[in-house]
Amino acid sequence: MFGAKGDGKHDDTDALRKALYESDKQGKVLYFPSGYHFKVTGTLNYYNKTYQSYTLNMLGCIPIKKGSYTPKEYGGIAVEKGVSLFKSATIRGSMERVCVTGKRNLSVRFFDHCECKGLVIQGCNISNFGVLFSDTNVNSVSQITQNTFLTLYYFSKNEDTSSGLTDSTISFNYINGGKEMDDNSCFEWAYYNGCIVSNNFIDYYRTIYFPKATKKQTFVGPLSYSNQYQVFRYFYAAGSDNLQSITFSSTADSFNWNDPSKFENPDKFAPLTYKGKDGKQYEVPPYVGICHAAWNISIKEAKIERNMKSLVFIYSGLTEFESNRFEVSFVGNNPYKAGQINYRQGDVKPYYNKGKYPLNEARIEGIVEVLDELPNASYGWSSSLNGRTVQVKGQRYSAKNVYDGRNWKTEWEKAD
């Protein structure tokens, strides 16, 4: 209707711009039939010399051929280098079963400085993009579900705004970062506030969660539940000193190969570094969680599959906020031994902090903690220590809480 060829050779940008405009204006489906390959060299929502906000109604179909995810088979859009598919707009609506491929380049971006409100992306095949959500807010119960994302260097990237994902869901997706990048991150946002990330398979990212802020602010969320995280160096890291406090929760997630440079992946992910008290730069070891300006970080019922290295890297003291917590627990077998906690020399001892706020602690369950001395945690209430087992000078001790009629106190008993 609008002059698109769909042969992969002719530039169909103007035709798709017109079609998208009319689809939004008339409330009609913009359909991508199997076998058509629409070449795009510019932003689709740029029309009448301005960036238009749209309600999408984009629909693909079951492919004629059953092979790899390509527009030739599925019907869809092929984006050239340097193109942001949607830019500087509010995007609503839905995109279902559409195939979109880029040019395996950081300059190719799906949503660039947009706000996605109640957007549904379902059953799509999106590949070879530098960034899916670039400085883009995703909110109002948006749903990103049942998609295949191949070679997506950054699922989200926060460069010059405080963008995030709020009150929305990322679930049942396959998200792959590709092997070319050595410092890519999957979720790089400034805040989440109510985001649920569940039942995804996510692999080949140097860092999975890498919150960054352009100004002083609090990072809240997300809830990570029943995901498989595979081939990564850092699971959760703090990417900015502007993060005033952090709340993060992981439940029933599985972790596999958190130092891929030493195992199946021949491409070494670039390590993070930190400045020591002596002024020198040091390499941050691979880890699952970082304790940095933490308020409450919880990794519960974690399944450790194999080849895991450091569990926690304590980047700064746990004395910035009252009642901080860093909690980790395991299910099933895990390969951890003593010395799996790495910490910045001179800040705090691992597992136990005698700093300004005595309630602060990094608590690890599922392993026997090897300490220099027994923690003294009688602060008026100490139920969090009940049942913990530690080892001091070769002897194991178990904690139990005893109430003397006025206060709770911790007593340590020798254990087998």
Image (spheres, helix red, strand yellow):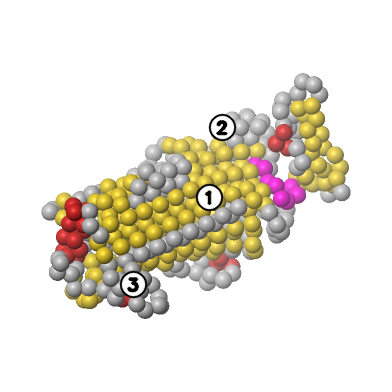
Residue 365 included in the magenta stretch of the image: yes
* Tag of residue 74: 3
Crowd class of label 1 (few under 14; some 14 to 19; many from 20; radius 10 Å):
many
Q: Give the range drawn in magenta.
A: 362-369
Q: Point out the residue furthest to the left here.
A: 48
Q: Which residue is at 50% across, 69% downward? A: 267
Does residue 371 appear to the left or right of 57 in the view shown? right
Tag 3: amino acid? Tyr
Query: Is residue 360 or residue 282 the one in the foreground?
Result: 360
- For mark 3, give the secondary structure: helix
Quarter of the image for residue 45 reads bottom left
Name the amino acid type tagged 1. Ser
Look at the image and say whether residue 291 sits in the magenta stretch. no
Query: Residue 363's spot in the image, x, y percent?
Result: 67, 43
The residue wearing badge 1 is: 224
137 or 285: nearer the viewer = 137
Numbered disc 2: secondary structure: loop
Residue 232 visible in the picture: no
Q: Name the residue under label 2.
A: 321
Q: What element carries label 1?
A: strand
Q: Is residue 378 left or right of residue 207?
A: right
Mark 3 / mark 1, whichever is N-terminal:
3
The span from disc 2 to disc 3 (Cα, nearest Å) is: 53 Å
